[in-house]
Image (cartoon, helix red, strand yellow):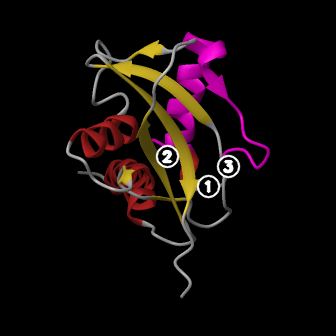
Amino acid sequence: MRPVARNLVLAILGVVVVLLALGAVPSLIETGDPYYVEATPVEGSGPAITADNFSERRFPYAFDALAAAATGADPARSEAYYTGPGGVGGFKEAFTHTPFEEFDEFESRNAAAVQRGADSPVGDAVFVDYEGQRYRLEIVRVSEEP
């Protein structure tokens, strides 16, 4: 193989490795306070999103919280999401799935079922109907400081 062709192949492989690293590494960064989706069973009626036909792969944070609520966990929270360097809207969000994206999707499906908090994204809430129960899903941030 000619040196020019070899260098071109190595450069292409290098670019592929860098792009793969950008896709995998940000999800491993756990800095800052964690954000959770917290599910609370509620009574009453009003606008809600029917979550029975949603994909658990598309809404992993919401379904984690709903599963925790179904088992009676207190608080019924999803897996933690850490924002990483740059905070909300930072570098990590460009490469990973976030609970904030899930709430944006909920809002695009039924804006009346979503309530935006004063300190958005903290305090953002959505009402969902899941397996015959009405839940209030809320984004909460829990400080890890003692």
Q: Which residue is mark 2?
A: 95
Instruction: Please report the residue visible at 67 percent of the width from the left and 45 percent of the height from the top.
Output: 121
Numbered circle sitting on residue 89: 3
Q: Is residue 87 above or below residue 20?
A: below
Identify the amino acid type marked 1: Phe
Say which of 109 and 73 sits in front: 73
Give the x, y percent position of residue 59: 37, 31
Marks 3 and 2, how far apart in space? 11 Å
In the picture, the quarter occupied by the C terminus is bottom right
Give the x, y percent position of residue 17: 35, 55
Say which of 85 and 123 sits in front: 123
Marks 2 and 1, how far apart in space? 7 Å
Q: Residue furthest left?
A: 71
Instruction: Please report the residue visible at 56 percent of the width from the left and 83 percent of the height from the top.
Output: 145
Crowding near pointer 2: few (<14 within 10 Å), some, many (20+)?
A: some
Q: Residue furthest bottom?
A: 146
Q: Is residue 86 above or below residue 139?
A: below
Numbered circle sitting on residue 57: none
Give the x, y percent position of residue 123: 65, 45
Crowding near pointer 3: few (<14 within 10 Å), some, many (20+)?
A: few
Identify the amino acid type marked 2: Phe
Mark 3 or 2, closer to the camera: 3
Q: Is 109 within the magenta?
A: yes
Instruction: Please report the residue visible at 59 percent of the width from the left and 18 percent of the height from the top.
Output: 113
**Local SS, label 3:** loop
Q: Which residue is mark 1?
A: 91
Which contiguous range is marked in magenta?
A: 94-122
